[in-house]
Amino acid sequence: MAVFKLKNFMNWFSSMFRKKKNLKLGLYGPPNGGKTTLANRICMDWLGEEMGTVSNIEHETREVQIKEKIQIKSKGKTLDFNLVDTPGIATKIDYEDFMKHKMNKNDAKIRAKEATKGVIDAIKWLDEMDAVIVVLDSTINPYSQVNITIIGNLAARNIPVLLVANKIDLKKADIKKITSAFPQYNIVGISAQKGDNVETFYEELFKLVK
Amino acid sequence: MLTFQFVPYSEILNLNSEQRTLKLLDIVRKNKIILMQGRLKPSEEAGLIQKTMELISKDFKGIELCTIYPEAKNEKFFSQVRNIVVRFLVGGIDGLTIIGPATVIKEIKRNPDKIELLTYNIKKNGRG
């Protein structure tokens, strides 16, 4: 117990200094939650350029992508960070699922192989993060073991977390389910694609890394 | 036919994290569904996912997993969820962990009083 507390203190202590230089803000979540769409929204809003390609097919992002030196402003304050977009974390990947999207067998196998490596890299990068935005699809039941594993690992590392309930523009969206599932976390509902409620999201970002 | 294998916590107690992961995946890759007493630590569960990804092949598509806490049965559903996240941080002997091959288990659904394993129809030569 004493060792655990000492480790927590050391994490907190070192994070105080990490925050002062290149703050790494990670985007984590299951596949197709909208991480890259949110990354693009942030980059378009503050840099005027997109970060990555998005797709309806799972595992479109298969490599960790970093956009450096983003500066956002809200209510007279500025926040500088490096944005790290990570591949979606999953416990299973089947190349045949990609073939359902009219992908040929060879391409599907390559995509599956890259996706497995992406999941491994995303988990490896957890230790590098100063703060994390967990992006969840608000039309899907949030109570999955992948979500619990991601959030549990962030909590165990004392990394500040903001939960984003994405796709609130869709009819099936239900933020209350996410709020009920993870009541100890700040949750902001947005549509990264349409830009709904992103101002509140940016305000929450300042609170996350204060 | 579904095969379940019970793994008492005593079987993994003295193993390090990597050994635990390998032991569990060795069973799952034999197309068995593990009912394990207790739960893994968050870092071990992340390690389990990483190792699973390394092993994915034509025949092994990954895993489905779920951790449940029978003592939470009388709590409201979302209180259970909240408490499960808190308990998850610790790891240990409480609760039950279900891990199965993704070629056998399609989905694990949690409900307040039950766990539902949705499986694929197993044909002689694989998934139906």
Image (cartoon, coloured by chain):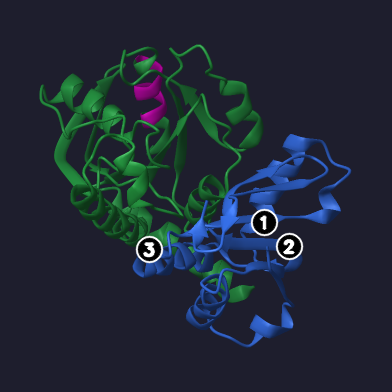
Chain colours: A green, B blue
Q: Is residue A155 magenta?
A: no
Graded by Cα atoms within 10 Å as few (under 14), some (14 to 19) or many (20 or more), the crowding at tag 1 reads many
Q: Tell me residue A122's x, y (percent).
A: 32, 54
The answer to which of marks 1 and 2 sits earlier in the sequence is: 1
Instruction: Write down the chain letter for disc 2.
Output: B
Q: Main secondary structure of the magenta part?
A: helix
Instruction: Find disc 3 in the rendering and name its residue.
Output: B53
What secondary structure is marked by label 2? strand
What secondary structure is marked by label 1? strand
Q: Tell me residue B1's x, y (percent).
A: 68, 63
Instruction: Find disc 1 in the rendering and name its residue.
Output: B67
What secondary structure is marked by label 3? helix
Going by the numbered disc 2, the residue's amino acid type is Leu
Q: CB atoms at circles 1 and 2 under 8 Å apart?
A: yes
Left or right, A170 with reference to B28:
left
Magenta residues, as a range?
Answer: A199-205
Q: CA distance from mark 3 to mark 1?
A: 20 Å
- The residue mark sitting in front, 3 or 1, is 3
Going by the numbered disc 1, the residue's amino acid type is Thr
Instruction: Please tell me which residue is depicted at 18% across the width and 28% down the height of the picture.
Output: A43
Instruction: Write down the chain letter for disc 3.
Output: B
Q: CB atoms at circles 3 and 1 under 8 Å apart?
A: no
Graded by Cα atoms within 10 Å as few (under 14), some (14 to 19) or many (20 or more), the crowding at tag 3 reads many
Going by the numbered disc 3, the residue's amino acid type is Met
